[in-house]
Each structure stands twice: as C-alpha cells, then as structure tokens.
Image: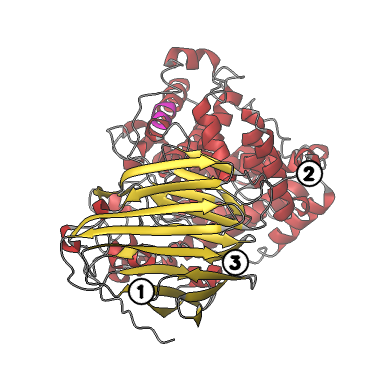
C-alpha cells in the first residue's frame, strides 16, 4: 500500500522471541556512593601506588623470546597488516575539515584524517613489536611525528569546548576529548616500548612525544576541572567520563615521572570516576543503551582493573554490587548476538569487546559473563587475531588468549530480568534459547543521555530476528547534538512504536515522562503498564493515555491503549516500525515478517482503526548497514471521534 500518513506532525516539539523488556527510563540517579575516593584516601594511594612501570609485565621490545609466546599466526597477521603501510604517505589535517563541521555539520571528513594517522601507526607499531627487526621503525617515527604535528588531537565536533568556541582549533587551549585522551594513551605505549630505539635515531623523537602528551593532555588534566566529562561540578555524566578517565589514567601511569603529579593525577581520576558511578542506579543499567556499554561500564572496568594492578590489589571495588550489576547488564540485554535491546542512541547491533567482557566477568566472579566473553571471542574470530581496544588489553588478550578460548562458551540468554532503576524488564519464551518471542519496551523521561523521544516504546523479535524494531540513530552530524536534534526523524516518537496523539508527538525534556508505572512477573510471562500522557505537550490535549503490555510465553504480546482526551482535533495514530514490508492479509490482520522470513500476525479492530503504512528509504549509511534499503512504518489511524476509549492490539503466530 502507498503511504497515507505524512511526517506532518506538530512539533512542540526484542523479541517477541519471548523476552519481554520494558524500558521505563528512570529519573537520573545521584547517590554519593564515592566507591573509590570514599574508601581510599590520597594518602593510602600514595602508600600503595607503584612508582614506575613495573606493573607492565609484557616483554620488553628487545625480548624476542617473550614476544614469540604470542601464537605465530597472530604475529604473522599483525606483521602483514603493518606491511601494508610501509610506503604510506602521512597526511596533515586540513583546516577546512574543521570548518566543514561548522558549515554543514559533517563530522566525517575531519574524523577520516584523524583515522588516517592512528590506524597505520597502530598497525605498524604492533608489527614492529612482533617482528623486532626495525623494519617499521622509520615509518613509526613518521607517524609519531605526524601526530605530534597535528594542531589538535580533538575532533572537530568537540573543539567547541574551547573558550573561543567551535571553528578552528586553538593551539593555545588543548581540549581533552575522547580522541585526544586515546591518542595520548597510545603514544605513551609507543614511547614505553620503543624509546630506546627512538633515542638511537634521535632523542628528540621521544622528547617530542613526552612534550606533546604533557602539553595536550596531562597538564590540562592536572590544572583544569571544568571539562564537562570530569563532572567535578555536578554535570550530568555519560560515557565520556570513564572513557577519558581510563585513557588519562593509563597515560599518567606510563608517562608521568613526577611522583606528586602522579599521585594527585591518579587520585583526581578516582574522584572523577566516582561521579560516574554516583550517577548510576543500583541496578547497573546503562541509560545510554548497550551500544555505549563499551565506552561506559567497560571503560570504567578498564580503569578499575588498572587501579587494582598498580596498587597490587590495594584498591579493589570489584565486590561492590553496583560494579557487578554494571557488568552483567551487557548480557541481560542481549537478544540474539549481534542484536541487543537498543534504546536512545544505541544501535540494534552491538559487538562488545570479548576480552573485556570475559575479564570483567572474571573480576566480579560471574561465570555467565565469562562464558559470554568466551562466546563473543568465538563470534569475533578471536583465535585468529581479531582484537580491538586499548593496547594494554590487546596485549593481555594476546598473551592470555588460550584461557578465554578454552573457557566454556555460552550466550547466557536469561529467561527474564528486571532493572528497577532503569525500569527495564526482560522475559523470553525459553531460557537459554533464542527460539520464540522476545519483547522489550521503555518508559521514563525524555532527557536521558543520548535521548530519543521514546517513552513507552518497545521492540519485538521472533526466533532471534527483528520484527518490530527500534530504528536507532543515524550517522552523527552537527545537528545531532544541537537544538535541532528532534527535527531528525529517528529521534521522534512518531518513528518509534508509540501513539501520536491529536497529531502531536512526544516532547523532549525531563518533565516529559511516564507516570503510574506498574510491573508484574510470573512464570508465564510479564506485564507492565504506564501512563504516557506526561510525555506529550499540552498541544496533544490528552488527560491520560495508559499503555499496557502483557507478554505471555509461547503466545505473544497484547497491547492495550486506554485514552482520555480533552478534545479530538484530528485522529490519533498508533505507529509500529518494522523491518520488512507489512501485508494486510485480511481485514484487521497484518502479516509482519522478521528478517528470517517468519510471519507474525498483528491483529486490530478494523471498526476502530484504519491500516496504512509508510515506506522509509534508508539513505543513511549506518542505518542501511543495519536494516537494508528500506524500513516500514505501520500506521493504525483512529476512526473514532470519542474522547474516551481504548484500542487492543494482539501480536502472535
């Protein structure tokens, strides 16, 4: 059918596999737990912190027999990747790539140039460590020099943190962002392993590395406390906090030789990390979604792992229930790898770092998480040297690969779970199986980190394949993180599985939230309900709109919308985003097809609702890679002029 519902909406502006998950997003948390600074003083840190780099237990560059402990096929693979760059011509970053972000919002051109330095440098660094013949050394020096010559290590999208604002980077005001923190960390490892080789060529090489690390990252970190990600003045905390802190921590541990700066710098990291965990709910749920777990909880784990290591176990909070819950979150929201429950800016497909998942599970004593890490290692071709992440954990994974490869691999697939702070519930038809239905939904408010206006939305999968979906974010642009964010269709409630009331969509803001949430679980399934009316602005003219979900194992999902309007200005509609084209096979019955070809029926009362659908071509590269060329939006338009009533939807075989 042709589309009949246009994107003309007022702007006051997974799995029916039997896993019911309700994402009622919570209020922001702020508990003064202070898991690190509240338990360990700076004086204690000074007593326990290692003074040098003895904590690094990898072989020295000259220890050829040590590096040969890594399986030969992995060494050969890394060397081959490095060989691809032996004649590489290093590029500078054009000023216009920064200006392009201001002019058009495009981040890609600038980030492409950053990648054009870090990727070949990384590959040749690993190649030289494994080969040890000096064959890659000149090109590594060229790469190091190219990085040191860059005006900024920060992304064009992030330099607006300068006091002078966005545009061109101010060389006199280095900004610590995701990229600069990572680059400093990486250069610190290069200098750690190759300093003697550099000094044989010219001591200015290592001196330049040390100078740039200090100028661009360490000194700004020591002397400033106004970077938003530090959260030292009550700012909202997201994944930037643990990601930047973990990289800065490793850089301090590798590069800082001044003892007092070393101690105070590490303690400042601890204090800042506390702001991150203070913001979490006790259930450990990541309100940015599983797609950000790697930069959030997993980066936090990296920092905790290093702190424990460099204090010889003196600083260790892995037994804390919150740290455990932050880890186990990642397998609770796994639908059927690589599909995860996705909300906010999380994509539907997630690829968690296998080694970090395994080590996190090992650190908290959670065998299902270790098994999940081993499972991911199999899926990610870990045995053949497909590694990612920060150098420390890449090295550890290479030397310890036999442990994870021999651990019993298993995708946990819990039968059900409930995250009361994040307000996420899960239930699947069969525990430890992707067969059947999986359902997930969310409530909460519309000012979450990486927010979409999606209070009360849900996803439904069948046999582990997408059926009713959360589209997720497209490619980030300047528009994504400005006041124009909610002009992007993927952020709007009309393109989630939600009602549009009197032609009005949900509104962004913490005050726009769900109310009267209830949740119940039983051996047969799960149910919950919430009043969506608070998520809509006054223009929606709604007194209440109660949506209830009832998920019954091996039967399917029932949705009931009970509404009370102040008046009817135009027909309200119910939207359902689906992966493949829907077919009206009979009056009141729509066949939906999952990506595996299984057909599931959506039933509605044709006396109350009129069916149509919208075809949405996917022009965004990221969305097209996940969903293909088209997505479809089922629209059920109300035929009633009544101000009170209800709609019933049944989904099943």
Q: Is residue 245 above or below residue 614?
A: above
Residue under pointer 3: 653
- In reply to whether residue 350 is colored magenta, the answer given is no
Instruction: Report x, y in % for residue 493.
Output: 33, 63
Q: Is residue 355 above or below residue 470?
A: above
Determine the CA span between mark 3 and mark 1.
Answer: 21 Å
Indicate the quadrant where residue 33 lies: top left
Q: Is residue 320 above or below residue 167?
A: above
Instruction: Report x, y in % for residue 246.
Output: 50, 37
Name the one closer to the observer, 425 or 249.
425
Instruction: Report x, y in % for residue 447.
Output: 30, 49
Question: Would you say 201 lies left or right of 98 here?
Answer: right
Q: Residues within 10 Å of mark 2 (few under 14, many from 20)?
A: some
Q: Secondary structure at mark 2?
A: helix
Residue under pointer 1: 609
Magenta residues (range): 270-274
Name the one closer to the observer, 281 or 450.
281
Q: How many marks?
A: 3
């Amino acid at each position: 059918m042709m589309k009949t519902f246009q994107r003309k909406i007022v702007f006051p502006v997974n799995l029916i596999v039997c896993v019911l998950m309700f994402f009622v997003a919570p209020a922001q948390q702020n508990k003064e737990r202070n898991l690190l600074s509240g338990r360990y003083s700076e004086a204690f840190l000074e007593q326990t912190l290692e003074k040098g780099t003895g904590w690094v237990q990898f072989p020295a560059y000259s220890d050829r027999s040590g590096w040969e402990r890594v399986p030969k096929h992995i060494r050969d693979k890394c060397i081959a990747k490095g060989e691809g760059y032996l004649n590489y011509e290093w590029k500078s970053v054009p000023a216009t790539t920064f200006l392009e972000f201001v002019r058009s919002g495009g981040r890609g051109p600038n980030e492409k140039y950053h990648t054009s330095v870090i990727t070949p440098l990384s590959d040749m660094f690993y190649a030289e460590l494994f080969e040890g013949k000096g064959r890659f050394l000149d090109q590594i020096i060229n790469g190091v020099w190219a990085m040191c010559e860059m005006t900024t290590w920060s992304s064009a999208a992030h330099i607006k943190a300068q006091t002078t604002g966005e545009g061109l980077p101010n060389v006199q005001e280095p900004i610590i962002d995701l990229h600069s923190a990572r680059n400093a960390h990486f250069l610190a490892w290069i200098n750690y392993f190759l300093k003697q080789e550099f000094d044989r060529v010219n001591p200015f090489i290592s001196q330049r590395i040390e100078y740039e690390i200090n100028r661009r990252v360490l000194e700004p970190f020591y002397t400033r406390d106004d970077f938003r990600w530090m959260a030292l003045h009550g700012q909202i905390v997201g994944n930037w906090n643990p990601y930047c802190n973990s990289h800065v921590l490793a850089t301090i541990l590798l590069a800082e030789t001044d003892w007092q700066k070393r101690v105070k710098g590490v303690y400042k990291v601890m204090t800042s990390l506390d702001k991150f965990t203070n913001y979490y709910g006790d259930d450990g749920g990541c309100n940015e979604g599983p797609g950000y777990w790697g930069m959030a909880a997993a980066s936090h784990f990296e920092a905790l792992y290093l702190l424990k290591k460099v204090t010889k176990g003196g600083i260790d909070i892995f037994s804390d229930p919150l740290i455990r819950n932050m880890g186990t979150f990642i397998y609770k929201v796994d639908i059927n790898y690589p599909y995860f429950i996705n909300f906010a800016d999380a994509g539907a497909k997630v690829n968690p770092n296998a080694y970090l998942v395994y080590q996190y599970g090992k650190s908290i004593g959670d065998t299902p998480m270790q098994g999940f890490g081993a499972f991911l290692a199999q899926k990610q071709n870990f045995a053949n040297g497909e590694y990612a992440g920060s150098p420390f954990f890449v090295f550890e994974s290479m030397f310890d690969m036999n442990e994870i490869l021999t651990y019993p691999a298993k995708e946990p697939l819990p039968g059900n779970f409930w995250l009361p702070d994040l307000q996420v519930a899960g239930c699947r038809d069969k525990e430890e199986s992707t067969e059947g239905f999986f359902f997930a939904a969310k409530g909460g408010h519309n000012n979450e980190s990486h927010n979409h206006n999606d209070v009360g939305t849900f996803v439904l999968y069948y046999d582990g394949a997408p059926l009713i979906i959360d589209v997720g974010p497209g490619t980030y642009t300047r528009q994504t993180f400005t006041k124009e964010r909610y002009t992007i269709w993927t952020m709007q409630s009309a393109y989630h599985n939600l009602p549009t009331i009197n032609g009005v969509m949900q509104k962004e803001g913490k005050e726009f939230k769900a109310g009267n949430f209830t949740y119940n679980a039983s051996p047969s399934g799960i149910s919950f309900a919430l009043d969506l009316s608070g998520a809509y602005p006054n223009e929606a003219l709604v007194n209440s709109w109660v949506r209830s979900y009832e998920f019954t194992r091996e039967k399917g999902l029932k949705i009931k919308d009970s509404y009370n309007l102040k008046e009817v200005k135009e027909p309200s509609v119910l939207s359902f985003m689906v992966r493949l084209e829907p077919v009206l096979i009979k009056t009141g019955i729509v066949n939906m097809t999952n990506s595996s070809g299984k057909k599931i029926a959506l039933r509605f009362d044709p006396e109350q609702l009129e069916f149509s659908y919208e075809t949405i071509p996917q022009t965004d590269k990221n969305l097209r890679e996940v969903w293909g060329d088209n997505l479809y939006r089922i629209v059920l338009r109300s035929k009633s002029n009544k101000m009170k009533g209800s709609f019933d939807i049944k989904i099943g075989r």
